[in-house]
Image (spheres, helix red, strand yellow):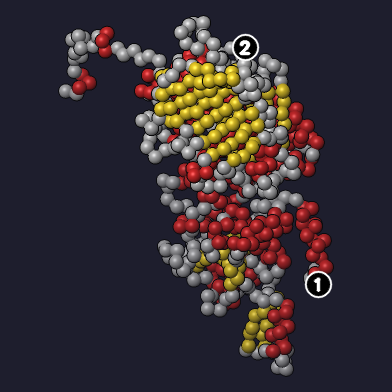
Amino acid sequence: MSDLFQQPKSDSSEYSAKDIEVLEGLEPVRMRPGMYIGGIDERARHHLAAEVIDNSMDEAVAGFATRIEVELVSDGSLIIRDNGRGIPIDRHPKFKDKSALEVILTTLHSGGKFSNKVYHTAGGLHGVGVSVVNALSDKMTVEVARDKELWRQEYSRGKPLTALEKVGAAPNRRGTSIQFHPDPEIFEPGTALRPSRLYKMVRSKAYLFRGVEIRWKCAEELIKDETPVEATLHFPGGLKDFLAATLEERKTVTQEPFAGRVEMDEDRGRVEWAIAWPADNNSFLNSYCNTVPTPEGGTHEAGFRSVLLRGLKAYGELINNRKASQITAEDILTGASAVLSVFIPDPQFQGQTKEKLTTTDAGRLVELAIKDHFDNWLAGAPDQANNLLSWVIDKAEERLRRRQEKETSRKTATSRLRLPGKLADCSQSGREGTEIFIVEGDSAGGSAKQGRDRKTQAILPLRGKILNVASAGADKIKANQELKDLIQALGCGLRDKYRGEDLRYDKVIIMTDADVDGAHIASLLMTFFYREMRQLITDGHLYLAQPPLYRLSQGGKTLYAMNDAHKDRLLESDFSGRGKVDISRFKGLGEMPPAQLKETTMNPKNRVLLKVEVPMEEFGETADRVESLMGKKPELRFSFIQENARFVEDIDV
């Protein structure tokens, strides 16, 4: 019988009061450090640094400190100094034999942040930060300069080694200095405080509060990268300065970032933000509450997403852009580079590591602070607002397209391969050596089907001019039957879902009439492949067939000309002086007898194919050209025509 069904033991004498452990002071922290700092790895070490730095930042945000010094010493210990008020050193009224300093450093849930009397906004209200740092450090030295006197006390693993001692006079000094060394008995071997990570942390703090100056210093032998040995960090522009330094010279969708800072009333706090949309889609969203990073987001991020979405949708409705209704907050923020910072009283975080803000009112605060500013920013610069809306709509259409592909993939994953009914497939099962001809119209398709090699050549006729995917929305692409047939026939998927190994044919050959209409259809098809199956081009699978435009015959001799110039050369060189030459112009592939189509255009022994290639170094230029000639903005095409019309010598109307 399973242990699950065994009778419980009735003897309770083995479990009694003596088995109940009572952990005092900071013992729980040393026994279960993960409960307080999230682990014992390198990241946890840096959490200790953040706790102490945040205390100094709280002094700065409260208006009592203007300078913070952060120094990483060669032995791996960290010193944080500020010129704030200094931790109180007088006797605590509840613990009469201890100073307030010792109570704060040795007692969980003690501090000056539980009410708004001392700190209006602070990085957290758990009251465990610096006491946890003390518990998990094998050495800690605290110096306090108050009332022109300097005091010092030393600790180890949460316990005082010395009494609080008056060191002497300090007429030109004020504030707190804490030096600690993470305990190697607690943390994983091989981990240490890293200069680059600490420097990035303090730099972000300087951006988050423009009123503070942070002086950074590090022992030179600890630096393994480009982190500076010394630096003074002060950014009067706040988050806008941070965004400018991060983006540098990168091209953005809008000329200016959307940035601002709003001071609400004293009971509600303040909000600062900066967001830009880089054209290269290298995105991030960094959020903070009272200078504490919130990597898992929270209510303030939710408010940020909401206000941006509502504002951009409202602008779309204002200019009668119906596609704006389909955008989501993810479409706006995917590809964006953004920083959001809030300062609020009584913040509530999820867990001691403070990675997610849960304060309910924070979302509403952000919305109220940003709404009017965003509306005015959009209305004040219509050109950049239109660029942003168009860019976000493209994101939405791409998202809808991916969802449709996923749904289609899910529906067909367990079913047999289904091919479009008008596809005349080849009989060979393997891809090697096979070809698919994409032809315009059923008439040309009929001739091609009769002239093909059934073993290796497949024919897919398309009806007329296909959709221009560069100017069409995702809904139109999804609904277009000709494109659905083409995608289904090739079997390799689109965009980031493209699977080269699933491509059913070795060569994909566009075969259109040798006239202007045929060239237009070929351009539309190449645009489709470039936008939706770019890897098919880079892998070398796309070709253009070269059907003749003229048939020239004289007696028993017949030749084919690709264009007018070719026809004139043949008349001069191959038919000169031999009587009348019968010249017939093909109106289309459908009028060519199957035997002639096979001989001139489909037979690998006689035909000419043009391989479609885009060199890697020209992909950016090609993308711009496709967008200007085939995209949504007719003014770009008009500009191209104006710039290049002078090169046209003759137009065959």
Residue 381, image quadrant: top right
Q: Quadrant of the N terminus?
A: top left
Depth order, front residue of 411/27: 27
Pick the front one: 234 or 638: 234
Q: Residue at x 43, y 27 (%)?
A: 139
- Screen quadrant of the C terminus: bottom right
* Outermost residue to the front: 168
Which residue corresponds to the image point at 58% horizontal and 12% vertical from the top-left? 115
- Disc 1 residue crowd, few under 14, some 14–19, many 20+, Cα 10 Å: few
Residue 40 at x, y = what percent?
40, 31
Query: Residue 447 versus residue 493: which sits nearer the camera?
Result: 493
Please report the residue visible at 53 percent of the width from the left and 23 percent of the height from the top: 143
Distance between the Cα atoms at labels 2 and 1? 84 Å
Mark sitting earlier along the chain (2/1): 2
Classify 100 as above or below 403: above
- Amino acid type, mark 1: Asp
Disc 2 crowd rating (10 Å Cα; few below 14, some 14-19, many 20+) is few
Q: Is residue 12 visible?
A: yes
Q: Does residue 38 sit above or below 392 in this rendering?
A: above
- Residue at disc 1, secondary structure: loop
| The one of 35 and 500 positioned closer to us in this rendering | 35
- Three-letter code, disc 2: Lys
Q: Which mark is residue 117?
A: 2
- Please report contact status of discs 2 and 1: CB closer than 8 Å, yes or no: no
In this figure, which residue is indicated by the disc labeled 1?
650
Element under disc 2: loop
Instruction: Return the x and y of residue 388 as percentages of the image width and height.
Output: 71, 41
Question: On the rendered structure, is 417 left or right of 540?
Answer: left
Q: Could one spot residue 323 in this view of the protein?
A: no
The answer to whether residue 628 is left or right of residue 437 is right
Above or below, 217 relative to 430? above
